[in-house]
Amino acid sequence: MEYRDYYAVLGLPRSATPAEIKKAYRKLARQVHPDVKPGDAAAEKRFKEINEAHEVLSDPGKRKRYDTLGANWDTIRSAGGGDPFGPGGPFAGYRAQAGGPGGVRYEFRTGGGGPGDFSDFFTFFFGGGAEAAARSGRGGARTRSAEGGFDDLLAQLGLNTTGSAAGSGGPGRGRTAASRDVTADVEVSLEEAFHGTTRLVEVDGRRLEVKVPRGVATGSRVRLAGQGGDSRDLILVMRVRPHGTFRRHGDDLERDLRVTLEEALLGAEVPVTTLKGRLLLRIPAGSQAGRRIRLAGQGMPHLKGSGTGDLYVVISVVLPSALTPQAEQAARVFLELARQPDPRT
């Protein structure tokens, strides 16, 4: 069984952050996805490797175990004078359908395969190969018939999961962590967050159409019961793209509105666009630049419960420019009549 360098697969250093791992995975998976390169065997193999690397490095528990494995790989390999899983190696018994030390047995059944399949390396050390294949809806399966594997292997060499010598308490046996919720990142526009929408997300090789409810915000987590496969829930982690017109503050919205000097001085009704549509807004006479006018119920719908936030319109006064001599003279007369105190004092 060959050691797999998952960091090299994703082109990352071992110090990579979760965000860097996610970014690298998405970029590489898009390049070799079977939908992009149908019938390309090399791309399909690469896609499997990328998925497998992401499966381990994106999971904090699996990543910790994998990093421990990497730190001890030379010790494991030297114990058998080469490949520890090869003939004569201390773990040759862990080959397909063979009994391992301590009576632990593993069985690997590899079927037709597909991008959702995992290698024997992954299945032995982390389990779940059969689960992942089943979640992807593909024909092949890799099954694990007993617990153990990683922790058993280190215990046989007198190592614990931190890489130091094991204590006198005897070898331990690790259990694969209980299945957890599946998360998927979903990006939507502000309009989609306002009205609600649907998205196609890929979970373990399966494409699901999911409903994004009204009112989601960046960071919102939407739980879809039972849609993560294997009786797990699917959690959508939302990101709402910034908007060119509206600024969001919780469920309230804010936007700027440019008005003329006449409209600001004398008052007027001017059209304004909201996410609900277009309406006429009354500008009170004497409105100063920066004045905020509240439009109740024109904000974002509440994600939980009924009700809607408000929209605040911020007035921006646009002064006339390039005055003619006559207009400049008229402005001086007007300003003399409407003399105002110094606003800076």
Image: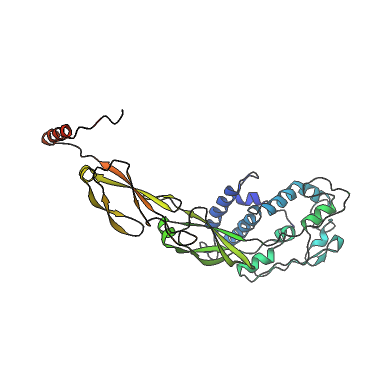
Residue 17 appears at what percent x and percent y?
Answer: 61, 46
User: Residue at image x 67%, y 66%?
Assistant: 131
Along the line of sight, which residue is nearer the eye, 285 or 52? 285
Whether residue 235 can be seen here: yes
Q: Is residue 121 above or below residue 290?
A: below
Q: Is residue 103 above or below residue 292?
A: below
Left or right relative to 202: residue 133: right
Q: Locate residue 104: give its quadrant.
A: bottom right
Left or right relative to 7: residue 318: left
Q: Residue furthest right?
A: 168
Residue 38 appears at what percent x and percent y?
Answer: 53, 65
Q: Is residue 328 above or below residue 158?
A: above
Left or right relative to 51: residue 316: left
Task: State which quarter of the image contains the N terminus.
Answer: bottom right
Q: Locate residue 129: give its quadrant.
A: bottom right
Along the line of sight, which residue is nearer the eye, 283 or 17? 283
Whether residue 40 can be seen here: no
Residue 230 appears at what percent x and percent y?
Answer: 64, 68
Residue 18 appears at what percent x and percent y?
Answer: 60, 49
Task: State which quarter of the image contains the C terminus.
Answer: top left
